[in-house]
Image (cartoon, grey):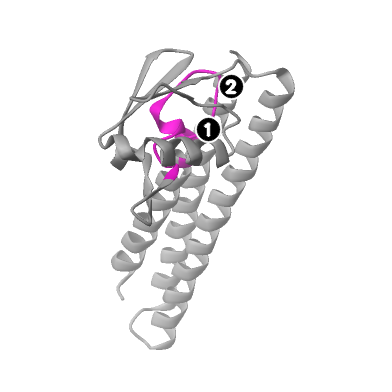
Amino acid sequence: MTADQILKDGEQRMEKALSVFRDELRGLRTGRSSPAMVENIRADYFGQPTPLKQLAQINTPDPQSIVIRPFDASALKEIEKAIRSSDLGMSPNNDGKMIRLQVPPMSGDQRKKMVQHIKKSSEDAKVSCRNIRRDANKHFDTAEKEKTMTEDDRDKGKEKVQNLLKSYEDKIGEVADKKSKEIMEQ
C-alpha cells in the first residue's frame, strides 16, 4: 500500500467511527421527541427482527409525543411488545390503528446519567479511532520493512495519521459536548 492509500483508508474508517457515534446519539432520549428514538427498535415481524422504520411511519406531532402508524396492522401488537421491552422507559398507547408514546420530561438525575453515557460513548469512538491509527502505523512499518517506502516517508505518514487522529478526536469531542449541552439545558 502506498502512503496515500493508507491515509485514505484510515480517514474513511475514522469517518465511519464518527458516523456510528452520531447515529448512536441521535437515538438518545433528550426530553424532546424524535423519530430516531424508536426507529431502530426491532420488532418481530413474521419471525424476523425488523427495525420499526421498516414497519411503520414514525411522526412527532409535538415535542412531547411520537406516533407510530404500522404499514401492516397485524404488526401493531409486536411493535407494542418491542417498545415495552426496549430500554426507552415509555409505555405505548395502542388504539388499534397506531401507537402513541408520550415522552416524559427528564429529571436532573436522568440528564446527568445521559451525559455520563455520552462521555462513555465518545471515549469508545475515540478508542476505535486510535485502533485505526495503530493499524495505519502497522501498514507504514510493513511498507518500510518491505522496502516499498523509505524511513522518512514512513515517519511522515505516521505524523499525518497522528494529525488525522487528532482532528477526528476533536470532532467527536465537539459532537459529544454539543449533545451534552443540549440535554442539560432543557
Query: Which residue is label 2 attached to?
Result: 183
Residue type for callout 2 = Ile
Q: Position of residue 168 (x, y in %)?
A: 47, 46
Residue shown at 45% from the left, 16% from the top: 65
Relative to 46, does residue 75 appear above or below in the rendering?
A: above
The reply to whether residue 86 is visible in this rendering is no
Q: Position of residue 114 (x, y in %)?
A: 64, 31
Pick the residue in front: 154 or 152.
Answer: 154
| Residue 39: quadrant of the picture | top left
| Residue 41: quadrant of the picture | top left
Asked if the residue at tag 1 contacts the one at tag 2, i.e. Cβ–Cβ closer than 8 Å, the answer is: yes
Which of marks 1 and 2 precedes in the sequence? 1
Q: Position of residue 59 (x, y in %)?
A: 34, 22
> Magenta region: which residues?
24-42
Pick the residue in front: 99 or 115.
Answer: 99
Query: Which residue is label 1 attached to?
Result: 28
- Callout 2 crowding tier (Cα within 10 Å): few <14, some 14–19, many ≥20: many
Residue shown at 69% from the left, 26% from the top: 110
Residue type for callout 1 = Leu
Q: Main secondary structure of the magenta part?
A: loop
Residue shown at 58% from the left, 55% from the top: 127
Relative to 69, does residue 14 appear above or below in the rendering?
A: below
Q: Is residue 39 magenta?
A: yes
Pick the residue in front: 43 or 34.
Answer: 43
- Callout 1 crowding tier (Cα within 10 Å): few <14, some 14–19, many ≥20: many
